[in-house]
Amino acid sequence: MKKRDTYLFVFVIFLFVLAALIVLPLNGGLLGNKGIQLGLDLKGGTYLVYQVDLSKKDPSMTDAQAMTAIQKTIERRVNAYGVTEPIIQIQGNDRMIVQLPGVKDVNQAVKLIGQTAFLEFREVEVDASGNPVTINNYLSQANLAFIDAKETGPRYFVDDNNNLAAVLQTDSNGNVGFVDANGKALDIATLKQGNTQMSSWIAARGDNGTQLTGSLLTKAAPEVSTQTTGSQADVNISWNSEGTTIFDQIAARLYARPSDSVQRGLGIFLDNALISAPQIQEQHYGGQAIIIGNFTMQSATNLANLLSSGRLNAPLNIIQQTDVDATLGSDSLLLSMRAGLIGIALVVIFMIVFYRWLGVLATSALLVYGAIALAIFKLIPITLTLPGIAGFIISVGMAVDANVLIFERMKEELRLGRTLEAGVAEGFQRAWPSIRDSNASTFITCIILYWFGSTFGTFIVKGFAVTLFLGVAVSMFSAITVTRTFLTAVVSTATGKSIITRGIK
């Protein structure tokens, strides 16, 4: 055997051993950090489809930019929730597909993903004498007008459950009026029959007019509450440099108001609901604050994740939710693996019966192919689904198909009177164009299927295309390099040459 062939043989053996170390065991491997990732249909979990209300997005963003920003926000939220190998993908112009393998608390995950989580800080409006303004002060006016004329933004009025009961705002025509949380106009007479002592909350702003919102946060983390005993928790927040300046300016202004008065409270609103209104106890906070509420550690953790992941740029409406049972997934995986092993066994039997020792070599190359393909699936990693398994099994058949082309071409060369070494070389050389062209057409088909799956959210098609593409690529290497290396090594010896020659005749 030539020196080049010797080096190639050693390389193939090394590659096989390395791939085996990565793959075995399938849940981790000696060199693989993760096991084979299973998709939703095998592991169980939930499949969600959201409709994005783009009419409520930031006007400065295009629809595509808003969808991309929402996708990134959902990814951060899901990752913080601890879901392994989630799939978050845009479908069409206004739909978002979310796959969460292994999620048990589906309702909590749905709430976490879809919540807009707009955090803003508000203070109680005061009149010229420094007294707190209530909804009654506005209801007593003959013509509605903002009492604090410097603040033209909406006024929030919350009920006893801290939910938004009414909003006083300016409409598109410049008229001031009351609406509910959904923007529907409210009747003044009806409001007078309710709680007329609800405080008016206006935007808390810095000296430059910038409102303090969650967009200025740099960190939000849960911690055990120092204000209460038991299992309650708080959320510790930190501001960026701009937020630090604005927050300290607001704190200094509120600190100057009467101690323990409602005017001294800083209202923390999350999605228009009042979470807490702690009293400002210091003039300077240096960019650190604590959100105090009736939180458990879990609810504080979820709130911190929402705040850290950022605000959704538009509301999400869930239009489809499909739960996949984990037991069904395990059964499907077991049956698929069993069918795959039976299919591979039949292929091996066919090759050995028809090609004898050449079939044994092809089977050995098939083992190398399988180890390399699974190692690639594991290292990328590829999320393996039922269609993905089907694509892999089909690629096994195509790997054997290449060997069949090579072996039949070898036989033709030997019948023409060539030596075994020459027949092997010519067989590979002349079979290569057919192998190349057939696999190229498969690659093109896989690319089309992948594009189709990505565009229309058809993940079944997408998973099949990925594994088939990678499997066929590895099968080309296996047939042309691995099989040829093994065959060259065998025919370089007198015993091997004799065995192969008898097997072909």
Image (cartoon, rainbow, N blue to C red):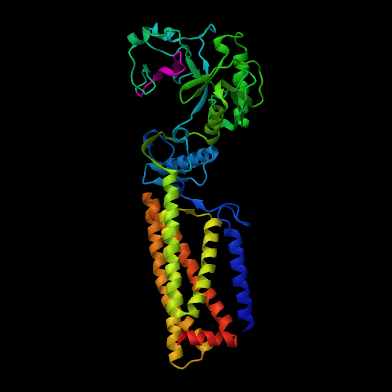
Q: Give how far across and how far down residue 295 sits, in percent.
A: 55, 23
Q: Which residue is rendered at x = 41% and y = 13% of the image?
A: 145
Residue 382 on the magenta span: no
Where, by quadrant of the figure, is residue 240 drawn? top right
Please state, as top left, top right, bottom left or bottom right, where the C terminus lies in the image. bottom left
Where, by quadrant of the figure, is residue 496 drawn? bottom right
Q: Which residue is rendered at x = 42% and y = 69% of the image?
A: 346
Please state, as top left, top right, bottom left or bottom right, where the N terminus lies in the image. bottom right
Q: Give how far across and how far down residue 387 sits, in percent.
A: 40, 56
Nearer to us in this view, 12 or 115: 12
Residue found at the far bottom of this picture: 417
Is residue 468 in sight in this rendering?
no
Q: Give how far across and how far down residue 336 sits, in percent.
A: 42, 56
What secondary structure characterizes most of the magenta part? strand
In the image: residue 444, left or right of residue 216: left
Q: Give how far across and how far down residue 324 sits, in percent.
A: 41, 43
Q: Which residue is rendered at x = 34% and y = 21% of the image?
A: 184
Q: Does residue 187 lie above or below 393 as drawn?
A: above
The magenta segment is 155-172
Q: Does residue 414 lie above or below 52 as drawn?
A: below
Q: Does residue 218 lie above or below 166 as drawn?
A: below
In the image: residue 270, left or right of residue 217: left
Nearer to us in this view, 47 or 368: 368
